[in-house]
Amino acid sequence: MDWIIAILVGALIGWLASLIMGTNARQGALANIIIGIVGSALGRWLFADVLGIGGAAAAGGFSLIGILWGVLGAIVLIFILRAVRVL
């Protein structure tokens, strides 16, 4: 059951990040899920582990703060992908 929640939350996070970054028209549902899950992991690592921001450890979780940190991580991921011309 946890993986279903991870897919749904990842899809939501990826969709919100793609709306903010303006890449929604180029991404499908699968890309939103992948960007949401990978972006949440990136956000947790970057903001919680590297920068030491305590609330960022909830990134990707099924809570408002977890979704917000996950979206921030997904935005960073989309920015990186744009820089290397993948998106």
Image (tube, helix red, strand yellow):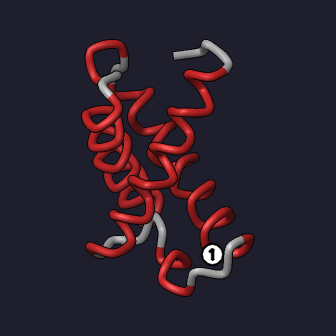
In the shown orientation, is residue 58 left or right of residue 85?
Answer: left
Question: What is the quadrant of residue 9 in the picture?
Answer: bottom left
Residue shown at 55% from the left, 78% from the top? 57
Image quarter hosting the N terminus: bottom left
**Residue 53, x across and y down, in percent:** 58, 81
Say which residue label 1 marks. 48
In the shown orientation, is residue 45 left or right of residue 19?
Answer: right
Q: Depth check: give the residue in front, 32 or 25.
A: 25
**Residue 61, x across and y down, in percent:** 41, 71
Question: What is the quadrant of residue 54 in the picture?
Answer: bottom right
Q: Depth check: give the residue in front, 4 or 10.
A: 10
**Residue 56, x across and y down, in percent:** 51, 75
Q: How many marks?
A: 1
In the rendered view, would you say 6 is above or below 35?
below
The kind of secondary structure element at disc 1 is helix
Residue shown at 35% from the left, 49% from the top? 13
Mark 1 is surrounded, within 10 Å at the Cα level, by few (under 14), some (14 to 19) or many (20 or more) other residues, namely some
In the shown orientation, is residue 66 left or right of residue 20?
Answer: right
Q: Depth check: give the residue in front, 78 or 27.
A: 78
In the rendered view, would you say 65 is above or below 38?
below
In the rendered view, would you say 64 is above or below 40?
below
**Residue 27, x across and y down, in percent:** 36, 19
Farthest residue, direction right: 50
Mark 1 residue type: Ala
Residue shown at 36% from the left, 60% from the top? 5
